[in-house]
Image (cartoon, grey):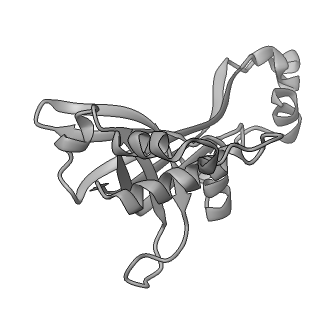
């Protein structure tokens, strides 16, 4: 990713915020047929890695068992998961300096995270149940009456869990670009907000 220094986000808390607020990630992987992209809602687990070493974290998701993606994955292969944060068109008319010099053009401001890591299939009931529980708690948290897995009949839930496969991406690197007019003066940045 082209990443000029003024747009690089150095604060890991800000990078994690973008993933947390925009959890639909696009998994890009190289297959025998070329590049493939799949869109999955993720949860970022920022706990230490299984070996006790600090890590960038692990992305957790699941796919339908009918989705061939999980069968095509080679455990440990490199992937990129792209998370798009806030974005929007910026008209030059919004800049104060445009009125004075007319030396402004349209642009697009945006936030994006590229999470690089190694993907692994987790086709075991314990992992899948835990992943679904955590994803559910995360995404139901803002509901007036959050849905819980226990709200569904046990046999129905067991059937649904058999129809999905867990995915995790153990992260090596997080790159974050926040192009928010940092290269313009304060007046123009305010005009673009």
Image quadrant of residue 161? top left
Residue at x-position 21% and y-position 40%:
30
**Is 38 situated left or right of 107 in this image?**
left
Residue 1 appears in the figure: no
Q: Within the image, what quadrant is residue 171 found in?
A: bottom left
x 40%, y 60%: residue:
127
Q: How many marks?
A: 0
Q: Residue at x 45, y 44 (%)?
A: 155
Q: Position of residue 102 (x, y in %)?
A: 78, 15
Image quarter where the C terminus lies is top right
Query: Could you tell me which quadrant the N terminus lies in?
Result: top left
Q: Position of residue 139 (x, y in %)?
A: 65, 44
State the residue in front, 183 or 160: 160
In screen coordinates, is 149 left or right of 2?
right
Horizontal side of residue 71 vs 157, given as left or right: left
In percent of width and height, residue 150 lies at 61, 50
Q: Is residue 57 visible?
A: yes
> Foreground residue, 55 or 187?
55
Residue at the image position 33 percent from the left and 39 percent from the top: 28
Find residue 13 and report its horizontal and vertical position in percent: 67, 62
Q: Nearer the viewer, residue 156 or 175?
A: 156
Up/down of 159 relative to 120, above or below: above
Image-based side of 145 in relation to 17, left or right: right
Residue at the outermost left position: 32
């Amino acid at each position: 990713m082209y990443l000029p220094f003024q747009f690089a986000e150095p604060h890991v808390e800000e990078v994690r915020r973008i993933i947390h607020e925009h959890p639909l990630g696009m998994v890009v992987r190289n297959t025998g047929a070329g590049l493939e992209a799949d869109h999955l809602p993720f949860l970022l687990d920022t706990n230490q890695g299984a070996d006790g070493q600090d890590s960038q974290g692990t992305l957790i998701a699941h796919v339908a068992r009918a989705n061939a993606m999980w069968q095509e994955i080679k455990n440990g292969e490199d992937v990129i998961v792209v998370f798009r944060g806030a974005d929007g068109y910026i008209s030059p008319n919004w800049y104060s300096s445009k009125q004075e010099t007319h030396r402004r053009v349209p642009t697009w401001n945006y936030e994006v995270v590229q999470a690089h890591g190694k993907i692994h299939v987790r086709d075991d009931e314990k992992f899948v149940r835990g992943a679904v529980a955590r994803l559910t708690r995360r995404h139901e948290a803002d509901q007036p009456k959050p849905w819980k897995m226990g709200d569904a009949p046990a046999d129905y839930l067991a059937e649904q869990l058999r129809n999905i496969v867990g995915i995790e991406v153990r992260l090596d690197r997080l790159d974050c670009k926040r192009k928010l007019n940092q290269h313009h003066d304060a007046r123009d940045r305010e005009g673009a907000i």
